[in-house]
Amino acid sequence: MDVSITALIGLAILFPFVIGFICLGLHKNSRARKPFIIVTAVVLTAVSILLFLQVFNHGAIHYTPPIAWDWIILVADYVLMAYFLYVGIKARHFIVIALVLLQLVLLPLFEFHWAGVIPLEVHPALHIDMLSVIMCLIISIIGSLICVYGIHYMRDHEGHLGLEKTRQHEFFFFMIMFLGAMNGLVFANNLLWLFFFWELTTLCCYRLILHDRTKEATESAIRALWMNLIGGAACVGAMIILFNQTHTTAFLSLEHIITTPAVAPIMFFAIALLCLTAFTKAAQVPFQSWLLGAMVAPVPVSALLHSSTMVKAGVYLAVRLCPAFQGTNLSIAIAIFGAFVFLVTAVLAISQTESKRVLAYSTISNLGLIICLAGINTPLALTAAMALILFHAISKALLFLGVGIVDHHIWSKDIEDMEGLVRKLPLVSWVLIAGIISMLLMPFGVLVSKWAGIEAAGTAIGGSGWVILVMVLLVAGSAATIVFWSKWMGRLLTQVPGVGSPRREPISFSYHMPVLSLIIGAVLLSIFIAPVLSGLIMPALPAGYAWPFATGGWYWLLWGKGIGFFAAWPLAIVVAAMLVIPKLAIKMKKEDLRAPYLCGENVEVSAPEFRSLADERTELKTGGFYLGKVLGERNLNKWVNPIGVIILVALFCVVLL
Amino acid sequence: MNVWIVLAPILAVLCAPFIGGLLRGIDRKLTAHMQGRIGPPVTQNFYDFLKLMGKQRLITTKPQLIWVYGYLISVIAALVLLYLGQDLLMIVFVLGFGGVCLALGSFSTKSPYSIFGGHRELLQILAYEPILLLAVVAIYLRTDTFMVKGILDFPNPLMGTMWLAFIGVFCALLIKMRKSPFDISASEHAHQELVRGVYTEYSGPYLAIIELTHWYELALLLSILALFWAHPLWVGALIALFCWFVAIIVDNIAARLTWSWMLRLSLIGGLGFVLLNVAALYLPFWWGPR
């Protein structure tokens, strides 16, 4: 193994841990922390790009570190569990205690008794292919931008809370360490290593939700903990079953699981358990409540853990396992489950007034779509799934960071309070609008992925009639998505006719640099979607999955037969024209502005007032539709959660039958 | 043959407004006759358009303009894609973008009627978008292609096996045309509680652009209907015109629905028809010669 590659892997995983501890050490000096955070950002970005080049040019990297690391992970596993047990006992939360005890019984039994070899080695321990690299790029680049954003955000955040003692050192410790843990998670081939990093992200998630120490934060943190521990327990169960297949560590290698066709139903049961692990992390119904609760955490946490990276670990695992269940009933059950989640959470998002909850529901919805595509399990579906992982990470991080900036100007995250924000805070409102457009409209990657996804589902119906059900759920969910995004954008735009151009808010480097980088990234990657797909996404398809389309003709419209994949840039020109024409070609003067139609009762042009009873000046109020009575959580959750549980149970039944 | 690939979209963009405008004129004449009036000449809509274009530009807020042009440009883009023989699913997405632009334009001013209309427009999208998307997939199941060109090359008329989906698509188009009983976002006949809904805050040249967009939209929707009988295409065109005539009659005899009824009707009725068709495609006797 080339020394430089070893160094890259070491940097990607261990460097954030080192910097994390330095940040923890600098607990009194937030100034001194700043350069360390920026250096981490630069180093991680460079490392991830170098890893990409390495894998792109020379293929997947296999690497097994010295056996000492197996020992370290073995010990660290139990340290983590002991901590979780302590948390459970301290909070007297019996579900947490029960789940940790379950793991604490099963894992030692497995490692020390059944297996008998300590530590269990798997060769290679790390396997870095294109899929890992996609995840690593997302984690390292988007994650770094979010950490840089956090510098300013946390200062404002603590200033607003009026804390006596700063907790920022802890915040950055977990945020930056998390980047290393995530990189480890996506590189791991040894399931025991994957499990360790998985639990480590659970720890970061728990501590970061807890960060504000309010009652709500404590409750949400513990809920996130126990729901994620279910996933951890399922993972331990899966490892035991997989080990028992051959009584060797062969099946503890992810590569081996997906390249060896499974025969015994019990193998599929293990794979289904791993999928359950994935679903808990990705907050799929009925586990969605932990992600919604997690929205009490500061914005950078939501952006990093709860939208662009940690929850993606769940869908990463599902996509990774795809070849193992290709062509089985399990695959179809997963597709139906994902499509169901996609629809119901998109519908639930319509009724939400709090912007972060809308973002959370939309995240769950998109993760559901990715899981659905993993279940459809054709080359086109997997391409769409991986493209969606990438584009969703960019757009959602952008939206969370935008909401954070808005929150620090108006101290509210309520969509109704954002009415007419394009006039009050033009820069950040257009950032939000750009983010929403990139999630919703045509030349952007998310829509292109969604489109490819629907076509993938359509082409898969021939294979199984059940996909029709998936299809119906997808088209309905897709329409619901349009409604909640447009509605929010509408509230931002609703302004009183005014004269003079609005004053732009002050610019701050650590707020606006990450946000603008993300916008530029979303636009460029969408325009150059053809090279992105052929250079990054399609090489990540597992062995045995043919490239779903030729990329040669991609730079122009295609006249293919069957599936027409589409170069997005002609539509990008259309959108650019729509934005530029009014700006350049039309000069409006003050006297061209008119008051909105109020049956002639307006007080004056730029006052939102009208004359009501006895000519009294009355303020004009407008609001958004939320349809809470019909589509609200109270009305829908009593159906949504039981159906989610039923589909999950059915998923396990399908495996065993 | 290659000339037509370039010529067809250009001709479509040039001719669609005339066809759409003329049809709107005939629509007004027919409606007037049904109501016992004489009605304006069939070319009246073109005069209206010219009159509006000549008026002073008045707006309430500047972002309105972005969305007006967005509406026009995206409908034209969808039309061009259709006549280029491109992917039908993408065309539906681009058309959906047009609807979103119209709603966003109406949200851009703090005006109660316009915002009301905008929200209802979103509900209309919620009603028709799933039907259109599922119908496209149904067409794929029959023809093995998502491309309009492939559908045109398909030897047999789709109508024979796809008439159930056709009914569903027709429902969707009624909603998309915003005619009674589905004129809930913009009240075709200036009902009071809405004023003119999404159009309330537009006047002069911008109202003209919206009118122009409607002509394009009508031409586009009728073209999509015509796809159901592509050999010979003139039969498809006649079917589309017949549907348009039925839409006018429905417009004149039906009262406006509430949004919840519209959603129920479209998601159970319209989507149901398409779904039935998808299921029927698996019945052995349903298959015509392929």
Image (cartoon, rainbow, N blue to C red):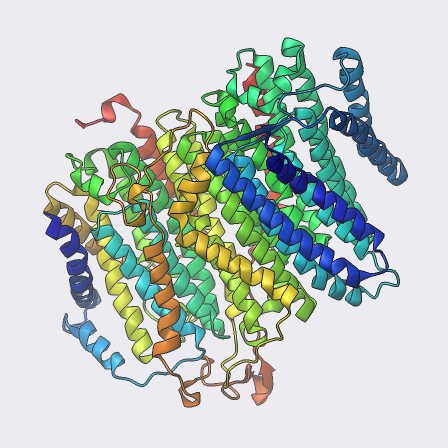
Residue at coordinates 44% horizontally, 50% vertically from top-left?
A445
Residue A509 at x, y percent in the picture = 63, 67
Q: Nearer the viewer, residue A653 or B27?
A: A653
Q: Nearer the viewer, residue A308 or A639?
A: A308
Quadrant that contains the C terminus of chain B: top left
Q: Nearer the viewer, residue A283 or A76?
A: A76
Q: Quadrant of residue A407?
A: bottom right
Visible residue check, residue A23: yes
Q: How many marks?
A: 0
Residue at coordinates 17% horizontally, 60% vertically from top-left?
B10
Q: Is residue A463 above or below residue A20?
A: above
Residue A54 at x, y percent in the picture = 52, 38
Q: Nearer the viewer, residue B159 or B148?
A: B148
Q: Is residue A293 above or below residue B191?
A: above
Q: Quadrant of residue A441?
A: bottom left
Residue A656 at x, y percent in the picture = 58, 15
- Tell me: A572 left or right of A236: left
Residue B157 at x, y percent in the picture = 17, 37
- Tell me: B38 left or right of A42: left
Residue at coordinates 35% horizontally, 64% vertically from top-left?
B71
Visible residue check, residue B196: no
Q: Is residue B170 above or below residue A411?
A: above
- Tell me: A366 left or right of A462: right
Q: Find the residue positioned furthest to the front.
A: A3
